[in-house]
Amino acid sequence: MNWDDESTYAPPAADRLVGTVADGEDQAVEAALRPKDLDEFIGQERVREQLDLVLKAARARGATADHVLLSGAPGLGKTTLSMIIAAEMGAPIRITSGPAIQHAGDLAAILSSLTEGEVLFLDEIHRMSRPAEEMLYMAMEDFRVDVIVGKGPGATAIPLELPPFTLVGATTRAGLLPPPLRDRFGFTGHMEFYSPAELQRVVHRSARLLDVEVADQGAAEIAGRSRGTPRIANRLLRRVRDYAQVKADGVITQEIAAQALQVYEVDGRGLDRLDRAVLTALLKLFGGGPVGLSTLAVAVGEERETVEEVAEPFLVREGLLARTPRGRVATPAAWSHLGLVPPQQGGAPGQRGLFGE
């Protein structure tokens, strides 16, 4: 099936150029592009200022820093900030993730091997198992864990003292953290999406490190399509660099950036083929909605979870799609973005449309 020049095919979430999940290539490049200290870190002014005070005060006292919780969407710099915390404190860092800790014993093994002042970065902390989570309460507060030896009536709890350490927890869903865990963090910072001006600075900095020449307008074009996320900006920069090297003289101008991103099917608002397939189905097949999520997913040939968790969040944030009790509805901005004219509102005389029209 095909709707004019729009295809129903959408790439898997993991293959999306504007996806927020870091693959192996992203992780390798990000390691080279990461800022090393707070002064070099771009954006997140409020979090950066507050965190700077926390770290400077800890260093002045000669103590370990308070436990830190960083929340926000993927790709905004939570891992980078955790590494900066360790660097600012002059301490080593241990990196693990919530899904990797399925048993309390897994966490006990990690905690017991920490050195004094070490930073433990726990990514996706909300996905940690409940037994490990309960062990973490005591470790964070009293720097002690109880290791259970044996089973049944003969089981014995052996207290294990831990050296003072700093836990940096990162989560994309802070609401899933239980209050007792949230309350044990001395500092909580919420990472906001970046403005186009901040992303333009990110693009210029990354271009210098990658030895790529980029004009101001070229950096602005990339930043405007990066969905407010530095990870996506860096990924788009690398793809535009490839295009500029093959099709031009290697210099990224506004025209070259626009041509390159057209090839990669990322439009001026950062929508890719999956996003446009969802909007096109909603507008052309269902007249703008309302339509159920499962029906919409079948129309674009994707799983329900892919549409709901991969495409919808950005479309809703951009004001192109709305979730209502009756189903998904396109906004007037969606019709305008795809250059389509919304149908005339029907219904009884005096009846108002979904958007009050």
Image (tube, grey):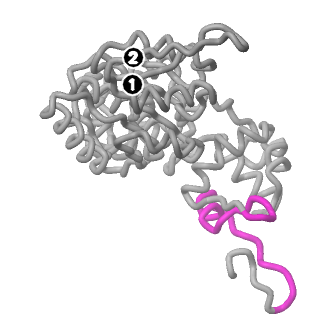
Q: Is residue 112 magenta?
A: no
Of 330 and 341, the residue lying toward us: 330
Amino acid bearing label 1: Phe
Residue at 84 percent across and 43 percent down: it is 298
Image quadrant assignment for residue 254: top left
Where is 254 relative to 59, above or below?
A: below
Question: What x and y, as percent, mark residue 231?
Answer: 43, 33
Label located before the other in sequence (1 or 2): 1
Residue at 47 percent across and 18 percent down: it is 25
Q: Is residue 247 left or right of residue 203?
A: right
The residue carrying mark 2 is 161
Of 66 and 195, the residue lying toward us: 66
Where is 290 relative to 277, above or below?
A: below
Q: Is residue 268 visible?
A: yes
Residue at 50 percent across and 11 percent down: it is 109
Image quadrant assignment for residue 212: top left
Mark 1 Cα shell of 10 Å, populated few (<14), some (14-19), many (≥20): some
Question: What x and y, as percent, mark residue 178?
Answer: 57, 43
> What is the quadrant of the C terminus in the image?
bottom right
Residue at 71 percent across and 14 percent down: it is 153
Magenta stretch bounds: 324-349
Mark 2 Cα shell of 10 Å, populated few (<14), some (14-19), many (≥20): some
The residue carrying mark 1 is 143
Q: Is residue 332 magenta?
A: yes
Circle 1/circle 2 CB separation < 8 Å: yes
